[in-house]
């Protein structure tokens, strides 16, 4: 496949009174035939993220139509799992509601932080969200001690199929601590209650890889397609691709992703956190660039899927 980059869509710096920079993990939802709403995690001057949105034109996602005046989801109460930041992961319509699956951050004393998955629900077409629970819907398990966050949910065959990232390890690179986790799969009957049974979908290929993450899965032409990113100790971040017939067993084809870092500009040092949406029959990818999306998010369109 080959993606055609269309450039930076939105740079949050100086745009919000309640946020200072970053638009982490762009998470798109088609509101109607004319508007794509992209949720993201916008950070304040203390580095704490809150969820807001940027509405773009479906016919031309480079055109910004509207931004949220206030966060649609604020941080949790003191002591909660999401007291130090919330970042969107996936949005899905369930009946007349919109479910927002998000990552909640809490700082640690002896480790850098923990991240667990929350659920917030909107009854006003995504303008505001209310927490389903003050505790994570994907809390820690014995094998997923520090990180357990859903990144894609597909409601299919009467069940909610979820692909998520989890782990229990930090790695040290150049004297800095980074979380390490892989990609797994689990299901739920209602999209709210998830058990502890899982299947590993994508694992590390070698000792250089320490994170395979943000699995964004779509069903297209009868198959499941996963877009994610890989973090390595030697070479930073890159996007990756895998394909599956059942959503559980995956064939990785990293070389087929067809998009990488630019020679210069906003995504020349890093490219990560992909999300893919079908707009009028054409696949669009939203993603972050340098320094985890400090300068915002951009997009690309699939020019060739061969």
Image (cartoon, rainbow, N blue to C red):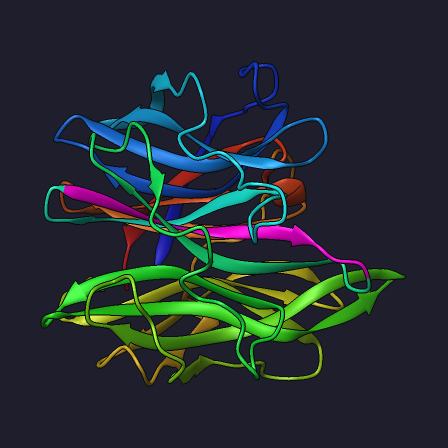
Q: Which of 220 and 123 is in front in this view?
A: 123
Up/down of 200 relative to 280, above or below: below
Q: Does the magenta stretch include residue 304?
A: no
Residue at horizontal 60%, vertical 14%? Answer: 14
User: Residue 291's x, y, as percent?
Assistant: 67, 42
Tell me if I can see residue 263 in this picture: no
Viewer-proximal residue, 196 or 19?
196
Q: In which quarter of the image is residue 172?
A: bottom right
Left or right for 27, reference 263: left
What predominant SS class does the magenta segment belong to? Answer: strand
Quadrant assignment for the C terminus: bottom left
Q: Inspect the magenta stretch and tell me whether residue 106 lies in it.
A: yes
Q: Quadrant of residue 31 in the image?
A: top left
Segment tinted magenta in the rendering = 97-109
Residue 16 position, x and y percent, is 54, 16
- Locate residue 273, reporting x and y percent: 50, 51
Q: Is residue 60 above or below residue 85?
A: above
Residue 194: image location, x then y, percent: 33, 72
- Residue ID at (14%, 31%): 32
């Amino acid at each position: 496949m080959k993606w055609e980059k269309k450039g930076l869509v939105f740079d949050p710096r100086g745009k919000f009174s309640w946020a200072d920079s970053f638009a982490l993990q762009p998470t798109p939802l088609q509101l109607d035939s004319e508007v794509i709403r992209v949720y993201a995690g916008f950070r304040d001057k203390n580095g704490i993220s809150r969820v807001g949105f940027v509405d773009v034109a479906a016919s031309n996602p480079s055109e910004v139509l509207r931004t949220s005046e206030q966060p649609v989801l604020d941080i949790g109460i003191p002591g909660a799992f999401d007291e130090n930041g919330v970042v969107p992961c996936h949005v899905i319509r369930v009946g007349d509601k919109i479910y927002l699956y998000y990552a909640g951050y809490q700082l640690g004393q002896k480790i850098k932080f923990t991240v667990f998955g929350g659920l917030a629900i909107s009854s006003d077409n995504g303008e505001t969200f209310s927490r389903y629970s003050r505790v994570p819907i994907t809390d820690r398990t014995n094998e997923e001690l520090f990180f357990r966050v859903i990144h894609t949910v597909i409601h299919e065959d009467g069940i909610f199929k979820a692909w998520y990232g989890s782990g229990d390890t930090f790695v040290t690179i150049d004297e800095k601590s980074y979380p390490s986790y892989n990609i797994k799969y689990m299901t739920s009957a209602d999209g709210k209650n998830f058990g502890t049974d899982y299947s590993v979908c994508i694992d590390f290929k070698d000792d250089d890889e320490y994170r395979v993450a943000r699995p964004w899965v779509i069903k297209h032409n009868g198959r499941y397609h996963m877009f994610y990113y890989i973090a390595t100790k030697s070479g930073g971040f890159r996007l990756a691709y895998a394909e599956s017939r059942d959503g559980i067993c995956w064939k990785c084809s990293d070389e087929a992703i067809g998009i990488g870092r630019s020679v210069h500009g906003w995504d020349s040092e890093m490219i990560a956190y992909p999300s893919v949406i079908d707009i009028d029959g054409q696949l669009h990818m939203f993603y972050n660039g340098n320094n985890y999306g400090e300068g915002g998010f951009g997009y690309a369109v699939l020019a060739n899927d061969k």
